[in-house]
Amino acid sequence: MTEPTAIRIALVDDDDLFRESLGLNLADEGYAVDCFNRGAPLLDHFAAGGTADIVLLDWRMPGMDGIDVLRQMRERGIDVPVIFLTVLSDQIYEEAALAGGALDFVEKSRSLSILLKRISLILGGAKGGAEEAGGAATLRLGSLELRQEHSRAFWNDTRIDLTLTEFNIVSLMATKPEQDVSYRQIYDLVHGKDFVAGFGPSGYRANVRAFIKRIRQKFRAADPGFDRIKNYPGFGYRWGIDSASTDGVAGPDHDDCDD
């Protein structure tokens, strides 16, 4: 029988030590890794017929930064999924990466397990709520449109630049409208089942609240009146359909005191 082909990752980073360390870790996980110290060699790789299942791309590199590499990839018809892996944490960089066609944006300080989870979600086709939605290519719920194939979200036909994780959270809630989704369900979606972090048995709630706060901010940038994400104090969140009916739950401005 033919051996299954290993998933191939193109790792692009000008930091030799980081590139070597991460490349070895990914190889230990069973991935085939091609390493590039600049964007130009990556583009040459594709031009020569080389392939990759996913690209991990640094932002700050000499000669051509990551966003320019991504732009040139898309202009040349190279539609390989891209995750930015960078020390730049400001939201402006994340928004630029997602607007340019990247699927995710991960800080280098995050653990290897987080990166592996993001890679698995993209390559495995696990788009958060996609399975709950029966594998539908597009989910529409009122003003919300979720295009599962490319993990793109739209509100009133305006694109909302969500990271893959944020998209998955929205998808999970939107496939269960007016149903409560617990903090733990959302946290497990992000980090994997039974992952433990934070202080105390409920420390993970702060992590979930931070995600929800960012998601709300992004939707409100497109629609200041956005209020679909409802909080069930002490339990979790739900995607509301009728903004005029809150069913007694706390409103969307109670991120920091919902318990």
Image (cartoon, helix red, strand yellow):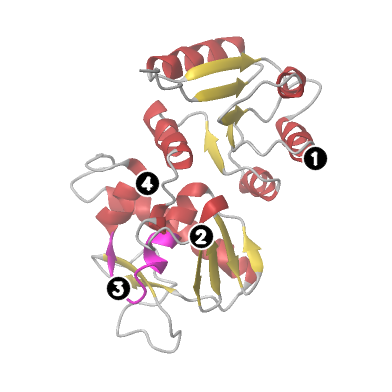
Q: Mark 4 points at which residue?
A: 190
Asked if residue 200 is among those painted magenta in the image, a careful observer would answer no
Q: How far apart are marks 3 and 4 (CA)?
A: 19 Å
Q: Nearer the viewer, mark 1 or mark 4?
A: 1
Q: What type is the residue that disc 4 sits on?
A: Val
Image quadrant in which the N terminus is located = top left
Dot in front, 1 or 3: 1
Which one is earlier in the sequence, the residue at label 3 or at label 4? Answer: 3
Residue 198 horizontal/vertical position (percent): 28, 42
Q: Name the residue under label 2.
A: 137
Foreground label between 2 and 3: 2
The answer to which of marks 1 and 3 sits earlier in the sequence is: 1
Which residue is at 53% across, 34% downward?
107
Mark toward the start of the polypeptide (2 vs 1): 1
Mark 3 crowd level (few <14, some 14–19, many ≥20, 10 Å Cα): few
Compared to residue 103, the image places residue 16 above or below, namely above
Amino acid residing under circle 3: Gln
Residue 201 rendering spot, x and y as whole percentages = 18, 47
* 225 or 140: nearer the viewer: 140
Q: Are marks 4 and 2 in contact (CB under 8 Å)?
A: no
Distance of mark 4 from mark 2, alpha carbons?
Answer: 21 Å
- Mark closer to the chain start, 2 or 3: 2
What is the distance, in whole Å, between disc 1 and disc 4 at their CAs?
32 Å
Residue at the image position 34 percent from the left and 77 percent from the top: 178
- Residue that label 3 marks: 179
As helix, strand or loop, the secondary structure at mark 1 comes to: helix
Which residue bears the numbered disc 1?
A: 75
